[in-house]
């Protein structure tokens, strides 16, 4: 746990320049917020900010995000499809 | 009302950025749903702010911009909330928006003395009193907004109520009395026709076509016995034929927008999207050549008639293929004296029914309408999606450790305790509060919740944050990302430091935050 992850997130002890003091004997994992949503690290788990906390798009049909999530958990072998990838 | 001719566009969402790059030549307009770029930084207060980073990004995109508001429906008796106008003004000015649109629907109601939103656009009361209420609401918005307003023809899954004004005629009365434009959503009209309401042809014959300033097209799908306006991808071919026949006869048309819900993008391959955009561009180009600058034209061309027939035939075929749908043969055995109902009464009762709150519905035909169950389900899928989007790790953790069925029961119990919220932040926070009150015993639950809160706050304000974990957080969350339990829990004293970057709230627009 002391190397750089593929995404660039550093997994190391506290950088000396950081203003945050580590608790004694704690292993600190540093996750830059701009790479926290990297597909290599966490499978792009964190949605766009607007999706996470904003008002939802206009729709008079059905939202299917939960259905996708439910199916994925039931069948975790399923691939997350990203048509634009 | 002077409407510039802008062209073909898409409803904007950040996931469409790659589409925009790929199809630059086929897109001239982006339609912004302003509220999707607002945030409610603190769910415990009613403060809103514009995501300035996104606003700047949109501002720099080389397209015309329109605004399609989704929080201010103007078809009911409740006036738009004035606290949102300053944010609208900012976006109109920043993006150079020439006109904006809203829904001729309602989403606000009162239940046991408390105001709430349904998170769903519901159909207005189509009576003279309903016309009067909608006109008053539109006028109120017109006084506050510095650009022309168009109102959208909505979806209505309910059966036709005897005594209601026809859908098209209701629209005509409202827009003529309010003196505003029409956003003609052709897919909504198709949806209504397929589910047994007024035909597209009859609707179009009843509205003042010279007031149509914008068209929406989209794809839909069957859900149970209903065809729903899902914005789920491909535009039905017959709908494109209708658009081709209709568009040259709209003297004041300014734009045609293709609506796609971001969740369905994975269902739509690039070839299909390109095909539909090319079709829309052809229709737009032909319009330029054939435009007749006259007002009040009826739809009489052979091509239009043939296209409308095809849509009707297709409706029947689709419905039969899918096992029959909610055609309205059994409409109202218990008729309502609809003219004695007030708009506020209609709104309160219908809203309570669809958010599953106990209420006495005096109208048997509405209470027993299968559309009530449909809308209830649609609102619930919407709410479940909001929780999964705002607390995705937490939702997955619960599904993985409790099982999907138990998780869904949790959601159902939660929905009984709280009405829907328009912002995912508030809906998510309410759910988190609910499960914390339940004292659910799932490993890592509190740590994962703390991480998701910290991540969001750091995106907002750019500040570093630390979340303590009694086990290795990376391997744990990677397992959740893969939809499985961790193979092993590596216990230890860990700190997950979320490093900040450029926050989107910091010192940028506190003056724009609005409190009510």
Image (cartoon, rainbow, N blue to C red):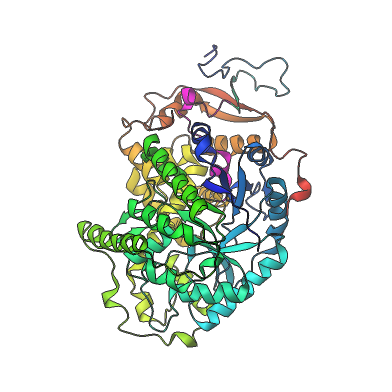
**Highlighted range, magenta:** A35-55
Q: Quadrant location of residue A75?
A: top left
Q: Residue at x 68, y 58 (%)?
A: B84
Q: Is residue B52 visible?
A: yes
Give the total number of marks visible in the rendering: 0
In this rendering, the answer to whether B18 lies above or below A26 is below
| B66 or B161, nearer to the observer | B66
The quadrant of the image that shows the N terminus of chain B is: bottom right
Q: Is residue B77 visible?
A: no
Residue B279 shown in magenta = no
Side of B516 where B424 appears, left or right = left
In this rendering, the answer to whether B463 lies above or below B437 is above
Q: Quadrant location of residue B192?
A: bottom left
| B52 or B207, nearer to the observer | B207
Residue B451 in percent (x, y) is at 56, 34
Residue B378 in percent (x, y) is at 40, 57
Q: Residue at x 55, y 23 (%)?
A: B493
Q: Residue at x 29, y 60 (%)?
A: B310
Residue A38 shown in magenta = yes
Residue B513 in percent (x, y) is at 73, 51
The quadrant of the image that shows the C terminus of chain B is: bottom right
In this rendering, the answer to whether A3 lies above or below B277 is above
Q: Residue at x 38, y 64 (%)?
A: B301
Q: Residue furthest top?
A: A3
Residue B272 in percent (x, y) is at 37, 39
């Amino acid at each position: 746990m002391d190397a750089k992850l593929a995404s660039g997130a550093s997994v190391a002890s506290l950088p000396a320049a950081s203003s945050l003091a580590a608790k004694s004997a704690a292993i600190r994992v540093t996750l830059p917020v701009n790479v926290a949503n990297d597909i290599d690290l966490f499978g792009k788990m964190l949605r766009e900010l607007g999706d996470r906390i904003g008002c939802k798009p206009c729709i008079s049909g059905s939202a299917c995000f939960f259905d996708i999530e439910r199916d994925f958990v039931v069948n975790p072998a399923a691939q997350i499809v990203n048509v634009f990838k | 009302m002077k409407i510039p001719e802008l062209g073909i566009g898409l409803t904007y969402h950040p996931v469409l950025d790659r589409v925009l790059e790929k199809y630059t030549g086929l897109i001239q307009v982006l339609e912004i749903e302003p509220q999707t770029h607002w945030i409610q930084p603190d769910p415990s207060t009613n403060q809103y702010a514009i995501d300035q980073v996104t606003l700047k990004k949109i501002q720099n995109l080389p397209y015309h911009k329109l605004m399609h508001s989704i929080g201010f429906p103007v078809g009911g008796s409740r006036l738009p909330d004035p606290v949102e106008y300053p944010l609208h003004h900012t976006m109109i000015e920043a993006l150079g928006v020439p006109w904006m649109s809203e829904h001729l629907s309602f989403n606000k109601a009162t239940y046991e003395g408390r105001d709430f939103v349904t998170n769903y656009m519901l159909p207005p009361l189509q009576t003279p009193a309903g016309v009067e209420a909608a006109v008053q609401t539109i006028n109120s918005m017109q006084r506050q907004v510095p650009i022309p307003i168009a109102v959208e023809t909505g979806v209505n899954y309910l059966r036709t109520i005897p005594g209601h004004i026809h859908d098209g005629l209701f629209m005509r009365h409202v827009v003529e009395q309010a003196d505003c434009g029409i956003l003609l959503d052709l897919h909504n009209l198709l949806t209504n026709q397929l589910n047994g309401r007024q035909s597209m042809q009859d609707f179009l014959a009843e509205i003042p076509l010279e007031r149509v300033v914008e068209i929406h097209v989209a794809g839909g799908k069957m859900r149970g016995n209903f065809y729903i306006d899902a914005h789920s991808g491909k535009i039905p071919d017959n709908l494109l034929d209708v658009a081709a026949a209709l568009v040259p006869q709209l003297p004041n048309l300014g734009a045609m927008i293709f609506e796609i819900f971001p969740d369905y993008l994975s269902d739509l391959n690039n070839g299909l999207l390109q095909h539909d955009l090319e079709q829309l561009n052809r229709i737009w180009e032909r319009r330029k050549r054939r435009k007749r600058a006259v007002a009040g034209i009826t739809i009489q061309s052979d091509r239009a008639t043939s296209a409308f027939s095809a849509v009707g035939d297709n409706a029947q075929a689709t419905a039969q293929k899918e096992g029959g749908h909610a055609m309205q043969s059994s409409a109202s055995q218990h008729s309502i004296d609809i003219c004695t109902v007030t708009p506020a009464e209609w709104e309160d009762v219908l809203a309570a029914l669809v958010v599953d709150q106990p209420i006495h519905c005096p109208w048997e035909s509405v209470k027993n309408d299968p559309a009530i169950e449909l809308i209830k389900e649609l609102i619930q899928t919407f709410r479940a999606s909001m929780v999964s989007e705002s607390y995705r790790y937490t939702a997955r953790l619960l599904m993985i450790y409790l099982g999907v069925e138990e998780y869904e029961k949790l959601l159902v119990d939660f929905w009984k305790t709280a009405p829907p919220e328009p912002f995912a932040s508030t809906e998510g926070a309410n759910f988190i509060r609910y499960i914390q009150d339940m004292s659910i015993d799932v490993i890592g639950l509190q740590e994962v919740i703390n991480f998701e809160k910290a991540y969001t706050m750091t995106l907002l304000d750019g500040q570093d944050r630390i979340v303590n974990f009694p086990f290795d957080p990376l391997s744990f969350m990677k397992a959740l990302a893969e939809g499985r339990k961790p193979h092993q829990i590596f216990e230890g004293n860990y700190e997950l430091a979320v490093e900040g970057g450029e926050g989107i709230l910091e010192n940028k627009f506190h003056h724009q935050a609005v409190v009510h």
